[in-house]
Image: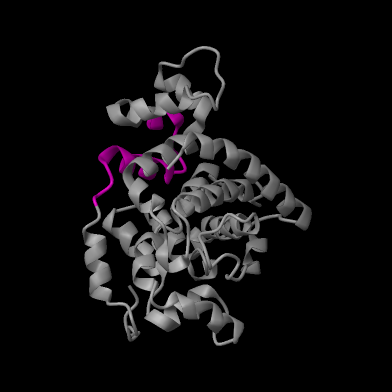
Amino acid sequence: MKEGVMSKIVDREAVRQAIEKLPLFSTSALQLLQVIADPEHELEDVIKIVKFDSALTMRVLKTVNSPVYGLVKEVTSIDRALSYLGERMVVSIAVQENTGQLFSKPLEGYQGEQGGLWRHDLFSAIASREVARYAKGNFDLDLAFTGGLLHDIGKSIFATFWKDASQDALGQIDQGIVSDYLMAEQDLTGLDHTEVGYEMACHWNLPESLQAVILHHHHPAEAIECMQPLVYAVHVGDIVSMMAGCDTGNDGLQYQLDSGYKEFFNLSPNTLAEIVLNSEEEFSKAEASLVC
């Protein structure tokens, strides 16, 4: 966490202790995230990891055979399951298995409903992947999805410490004291949900690319240059999710869009509208498959 800022309400040590109490990611889930973060990975790498985790295998097969996919013949092999689900759905299942309680609990400080964080992050993941399709250069679509899925995980812990100050956040924005919700978090508590999320990512030993997304998704220009395309994809995906009404509570649409995304993506107003529609359609199907 950033040092040199006097905490006004939040006890940083209490936050650290809450993070240290979090269970670690399973070996297979961490391996999956590391593989997805490698641009040279192949589908076979994902299949091997899933096959060696019986619990994950069962969940993947249960998902692909659910009525949502409407398959006539039962799928009994991981190879076939992944051909239907794709890497991104398998990652979603693994992440949900390891962090389901964090995603599903109500975000008190944001006045968010139960499961709201999971729905927002899932929509953001889908939207981030859609944004990445319009990249000016080569782009790992599934890594953009994974980044979107984890970008707001810090809210799951920060919300508890934020609830006593959150009522003043919107007032600060309306009065022009701060320019967005993230700055209000910093001004009122001395830290914010991106810092907490970054500490969680470090605790879990997540790949550096995902750490960068979690820390910088509201200010992508602050990420190191090689990480900026990925962080900008999630930055825009996050905004798209809020535009579609899928937010985490009282901070919806209270963040600024960094126009620096134009350096990396060809996104016209019509394209953004199409991204919203495509994301809504895929989200409906994914949400039905992954009930948190």
Q: Is residue 185 above or below residue 276?
A: below
**Residue located farthest toward the top when viewing the structure as drawn:** 73
Residue 232 horizontal/vertical position (percent): 56, 60
In magenta stretch: residue 34: yes
Asked if residue 24 is among those painted magenta in the image, a careful observer would answer yes
Instruction: Looking at the picture, tell me which residue is in the foreground, 136 or 7.
Output: 7
Residue name at image x 68 percent, y 50 percent: 276
**Image spot of residue 38 (x, y percent):** 42, 44
x, y percent for residue 269? 76, 57
Q: Quadrant of the N terminus?
A: bottom left
Q: Residue at x 78, y 53 (%)?
A: 270
- Label count reads 0
For the record, the magenta segment spans 23-46
Any part of residue 107 in sight: yes
Q: What's the residue at 27%, 77% (across, down)? A: 11
The image quarter containing residue 9 is bottom left
Q: Residue at x 54, y 69 (%)?
A: 221
Quadrant in the picture for the C terminus: top left
| Picture quadrant where residue 266 is located | bottom right
- Is residue 260 found left or right of 59 in the rendered image? right
